[in-house]
Image (tube, grey):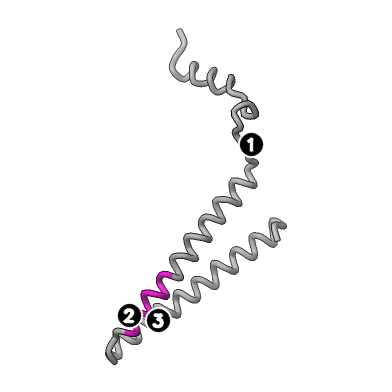
């Protein structure tokens, strides 16, 4: 008696990727795409954090604690952005994508 998984395996074997226009990706391509997505998300997060911190700095109204907190948030966001860009450059250099 065939189980559900046996049927699923038979269907998966019967599908030809070329006939269905399904791209065949290598593991390297998949890892590279995932890394690009992570770098993009981290970069967007850092830029949005810098914008929010700049707004907090602007509306701090001279409060020393709020101003220091906003400055630190900007500093940490810029450092994070530098780390993300560095990681992007290093991984692209190592993989030879640049």
Left or right: residue 1 compared with residue 15: left
Q: Main secondary structure of the magenta part?
A: helix
Mark positioned earlier in the residue sequence (1 or 3): 1
Q: Which residues are magenta?
A: 48-58
Mark positioned earlier in the residue sequence (1 or 2): 1
Residue highlighted by disc 1: 24
57 part of magenta stretch: yes
* Residue 17 drawn at (x, y percent): 62, 29
Q: Is residue 84 above or below residue 59?
A: above
Structural crowding at the residue carrying mark 3, measured as other residues with C-alpha within 10 Å and reported as few (<14), some (14–19) or many (≥20) = few
Residue highlighted by disc 3: 72
Q: Is residue 58 above or below residue 43?
A: below
Structural crowding at the residue carrying mark 2, measured as other residues with C-alpha within 10 Å and reported as few (<14), some (14–19) or many (≥20) = some
Structural crowding at the residue carrying mark 1, measured as other residues with C-alpha within 10 Å and reported as few (<14), some (14–19) or many (≥20) = few
User: Label 2 near label 1: C-beta < 8 Å?
Assistant: no
Task: Determine the residue positioned at 45% across, 71% down.
Answer: 47
* Residue 39 drawn at (x, y percent): 53, 60
User: Label 2 near label 3: C-beta < 8 Å?
Assistant: no
């Amino acid at each position: 008696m065939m189980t559900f998984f046996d049927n699923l395996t038979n269907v998966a074997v019967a599908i030809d990727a070329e006939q269905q226009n399904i791209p065949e990706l290598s593991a390297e391509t998949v890892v590279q795409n995932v890394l690009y997505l992570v770098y993009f998300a981290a970069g967007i997060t850092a830029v949005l954090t810098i914008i929010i911190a700049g707004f907090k700095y602007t509306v701090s109204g001279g409060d020393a604690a709020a101003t220091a907190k906003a400055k630190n948030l900007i500093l940490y966001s810029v450092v994070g952005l530098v780390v993300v860009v560095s990681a992007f450059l290093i991984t692209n250099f190592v993989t030879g994508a640049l």
